[in-house]
Amino acid sequence: MIQSFGPIMNEGGSVMSLTYIASERTIPGYGGGMSSAKAQLESDTRVLAWEAGRKYGIRVNTISAGPLKSRAASAIGTKGARTFIDYAIDYAKANAPLAQDLFSSDVANAALFLLSPLSRAVSGITLYVDNGLHSMGLAVDSQAMIPDE
């Protein structure tokens, strides 16, 4: 895409993509093929930030969005009456530092920032829009975390 559009983009323009935490952490039920594809996308973001920045003067970034109830996400596996994304949303709300719903508008607002001149010096990053879930190393709602009585 950058190869085709880079030459006709305005200097200072921006390209953005979407990724998911499965690029760096194991997410049972998400699928290995998609995880490795997202890891490659994040690597490409860093490489293209250099190449497109130098060649066309444009920025390249990606957003790692937390679990959102979308049509595409709802199609990933089911366990009984609930889909994978239903479990992922519940897990995120139980374990993220900000225990709140994540909305598509949260991701859109981050994208607006990355695509705007306000982020003119930001390139090659993965911006996490996931209520801080990416920062957690251990699930606080795990049975292993319940103290002995």
Image (cartoon, helix red, strand yellow):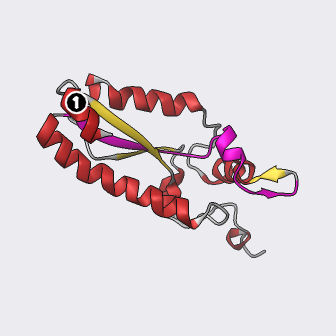
* Figure quadrant of residue 146: bottom right
> x%, y% of residue 37?
46, 59
**Left or right side of 3 for 64:** right
Q: Give me the residue at 43% from left, 32% from top.
A: 110
The quarter of the picture where the C terminus appears is: bottom right
The quarter of the picture where the N terminus appears is: top left
Q: Give me the residue at 19% from left, 32% from top.
A: 7
Q: Residues within 10 Å of mark 1 (few under 14, many from 20)?
A: some
Q: Front-most of 7 and 103?
A: 7
* Figure quadrant of residue 17: top left
**Furthest-bottom residue in this view:** 148
What range is drawn magenta here? 58-80
> x%, y% of residue 111?
42, 31
Where is 95 relative to 5, above or below? below
Where is 62 relative to 8, above or below? below
Q: Secondary structure at mark 1?
A: loop
| Residue 136 visible in the picture | no
- Please tell me whether residue 5 belongs to the stretch shown in magenta: no
